Image (tube, helix red, strand yellow):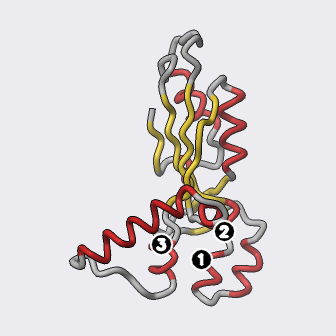
Amino acid sequence: MLCHGVLGYLARPEPVIDQLCRCVVPGGLVSIMDGNANAMAVRPALEGRWADALEAFDARTEIGVLGARGYARTVDEIARLLAERGVGMEHWYGVWLFVDWLEFSGRALDPTDEERLQAAAAVELEASRRDPYRQLSRAFHVVARKPRDAHRQPS
């Protein structure tokens, strides 16, 4: 079950997580991407908005690049919500570290430069798996599994 780019627009993720955990088959995976509450100060700091960055250290919402209110959570919060529903987190990854922050700092990759894009992708992949880098990613990806011996609940 995939839930990418959805929870960040919901003040309360529980109903969606309930449904994901209810619908996934025993032994199946739940894949969730959400905004990283632990990195909320990075974007305004890179944009030189120092007062906003200072406030963002404790923020859980922001008006994102699309102009909509976004909500952010921590990996531990999502893992807890999944565990409460009988689905255990197997691993998590950071998403959009260097490339996203590069764009917010006023630089961008040339999409026609395949060699540089491949190099950037290799760096992003490595950072996604390593601390402390993955902790600074703008978003995170949680991979969780429902136990094989779990009984499927009706939807």
- Disc 2 marks a residue whose amino acid type is Met
Q: Residue at x 52, y 11 (%)?
A: 154
Residue in the picture at 65% in, 43% down = 12
Specify whether residue 153 is in view.
no
On the image, the x and y values in percent for residue 23 come to 49, 22
Residue 96 shown left or right of residue 37 in the figure: left
Q: Secondary structure at mark 2?
A: loop
The reply to whether dot 1 and dot 3 touch (C-beta < 8 Å) is no
Name the residue beneath numbered marker 3: 100
Residue 78 figure quarter: top right
> What is the distance, in whole Å, between disc 1 and disc 2 at their CAs?
7 Å
Q: Residue at x 65, y 61 (%)?
A: 131
| Mark 1 or mark 3: whose residue is earlier in sequence | 1
Q: CA distance from mark 3 to mark 2?
A: 13 Å
Dot placed on the residue nearer the N-terminal end, 3 or 2: 2
Residue under pointer 1: 43
Task: Using the image, determine if residue 118 lies above or below residue 83.
Answer: below
Circle 1 SS class: helix
Q: Using the image as rendered, state which of residue 16 and residue 114 is in the foreground.
A: 114
Looking at the image, is mark 3 or mark 2 nearer the viewer? Answer: 3
Residue linked to disc 2 = 40
In the figure, residue 79 lies in which quadrant?
A: top right
The amino acid on which the numbered mark 1 sits, given as a three-letter code, is: Arg
